[in-house]
Amino acid sequence: MFDKKSIIEQLLKVIREKGYAGMSLSCISEATGLKKSSIYHFFPDGKNQIALEIIKFADQMLSEKFLQLAESGDAYDVKFNKTLNILSEFYGKGNSSCLLDVMTIDNNDEQTQKAIKQLLLKLINVFKALFQEAGLEERGAHLNATDIVVRLQGALVICRVTKETQYFADVISSLRIEAKTT
């Protein structure tokens, strides 16, 4: 029996490996074990719906973890490191492509683009809230948060291109060191 959540988890892996453009019905069928007719049963609007469901799944998963962390009462440095741990786990320590990157290649669907933008801004706001909690004023917190997200996402793109995860690990290590000196 197939459940939508496990199908979306498999599709998350497929889109990270193949990208949006490379995610064909054959790939989807192979990864999920679904016949093409069953794929359309779960996703009647096709590839764009699949992309939106993947983004929604990732958003829910990360939001739950970030919310728990925000409500934890931990000190700033502990929350910061746990946030990096969450992202490191989500991105397979650099082995999994940046979802926001692979979703935007050859995908001009307005709804998908909007969902990707919202997820990216949410990630920036997670770090911004941490910096504000640590005492930075709003503009400085925003600049630092944006810088972190750009560095993490950039490292993931480099990892995808070079097939070497050390770039992501180096950025995570660098951010941990910088957090200690702030």
Image: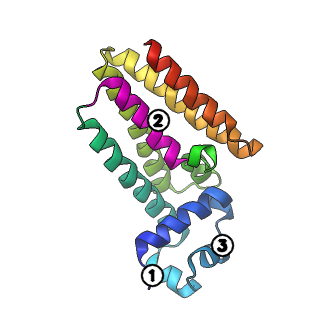
Q: Quadrant of residue 150?
A: top right
Q: Is residue 91 above or below residue 142?
A: below
Q: Which stretch appears magenta?
A: 74-91
Please give the residue where the numbered disc 3 appears in the rendered image: 27
Q: Nearer the viewer, residue 52 or 152?
A: 152
**Sooner in the amino-acid sequence: mark 1 or mark 2:** 1
| Marks 3, 2: nearer the viewer | 2
- Labelled disc at residue 116: none
User: x%, y% of residue 11?
Assistant: 55, 66
Q: Secondary structure at mark 1?
A: loop
Q: Secondary structure at mark 3?
A: helix
Name the quarter where the N terminus is drawn: bottom left
Please give the residue where the numbered disc 2 appears in the rendered image: 84
Residue positioned 56% across, 34% down in the render: 152
Please indicate, yes or no, whether residue 131 appears anywhere in the rendered image. yes
- Labelled disc at residue 2: 1
Q: Secondary structure at mark 2?
A: helix
**Magenta stretch: residue 88 in it?**
yes
Q: Quadrant of residue 107?
A: bottom right
